């Protein structure tokens, strides 16, 4: 795969091909299942979507999720939603004491203003319909989705491209990866739901993999002979 424009071309290492094509979809999948009620429309969408296959290509958790949801009849999807909806309500009650938020799990001090400043420095603001805090897992995952989309769909000079990679690396290293492993361990101990166990495994596996691939791609950018100007997938 090549990322190109009419002016410049960036060769992406072979090891990064599937990752770069799939990562935005996987972040969206995680955001929706960790941040929203498992409605029939949500579950049915992902059961039919090629996105669940993208998650399955890269992680064991994605394969477990695909096995649970894909190929289901409408009647089976209704029963899945009933079961998982009841489990979501139970986990929601549990999370009132320990919300799915960085400040509840991170061993480091996390102030709301720090995250707000981090988002603002990247030119990002969120329209929150449910009043989620800035350190909620769904907000942090959505932030990564936004930066991924910007990296692929907008015109940037080489310095801007590297800056976007660095912001994502820093956010994973200093925020998401400091607390999500503890959250996943607690979630795994709190449920027997095939849906939430698979999503938890997918989250834990993918964030580590994503950081590794960002580092690899940055090295490729620095080694490229020509600067990056505009980025599109071809």
Image: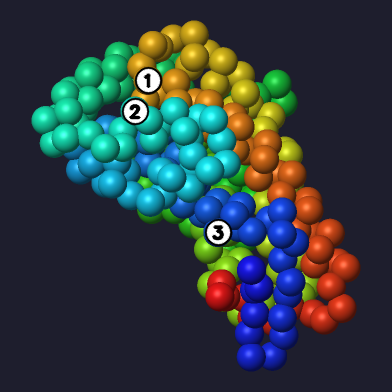
Residue 48 lies left or right of residue 65; in this view the side is left
In the rendered view, tell whether residue 194 sits above or below residue 52.
Answer: above
68 and 124: which is toward the camera: 68
Q: Position of residue 110 (x, y in %)?
A: 65, 32
Residue 95 in which image quadrant: top left
At x 48% / y 35%, what residue is drawn? 62
From the image, tell me which residue sits under label 1: 194
Residue 14 in which image quadrant: bottom right
Q: Position of residue 160 (x, y in %)?
A: 72, 71
Label 2 and label 3: CA atoms lie apart by 23 Å
Q: Position of residue 17 (x, y in %)?
A: 64, 59
Residue 68: which disc? 2
Q: Are marks 2 and 1 in contact (CB under 8 Å)?
A: yes
Q: Position of residue 229 (x, y in %)?
A: 70, 82
Q: Are marks 1 and 3 in contact (CB under 8 Å)?
A: no
Residue 21: which disc? 3
């Amino acid at each position: 795969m090549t990322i190109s424009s009419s002016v410049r071309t960036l060769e992406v290492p072979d090891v990064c091909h599937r990752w770069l094509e799939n990562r935005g979809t996987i972040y969206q999948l995680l955001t929706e299942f960790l941040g929203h009620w498992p409605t029939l429309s949500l579950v049915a969408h992902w059961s039919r979507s090629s996105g669940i296959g993208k998650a399955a290509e890269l992680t064991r958790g994605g394969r477990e999720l695909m096995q649970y949801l894909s190929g289901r009849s409408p009647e089976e999807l209704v029963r899945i939603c009933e079961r998982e909806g009841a489990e979501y309500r139970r986990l929601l009650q549990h999370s009132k004491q320990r919300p799915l938020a960085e400040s509840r799990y991170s061993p480091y001090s996390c102030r709301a203003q720090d995250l707000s400043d981090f988002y603002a420095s990247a030119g990002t603001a969120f329209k929150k319909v449910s009043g989620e805090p800035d350190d909620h897992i769904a907000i942090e995952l959505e932030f990564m989705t936004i930066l991924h989309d910007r990296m692929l769909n907008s015109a940037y000079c080489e310095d801007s491209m590297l800056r976007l990679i660095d912001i994502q690396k820093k956010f994973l290293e200093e925020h998401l990866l400091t607390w999500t492993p503890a959250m996943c361990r607690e979630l795994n101990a709190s449920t027997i739901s095939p849906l939430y166990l698979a999503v938890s495994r997918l989250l834990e596996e993918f964030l580590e993999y994503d950081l590794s691939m960002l580092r690899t791609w940055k090295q490729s950018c620095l080694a490229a002979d020509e600067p990056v100007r505009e980025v599109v997938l071809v």
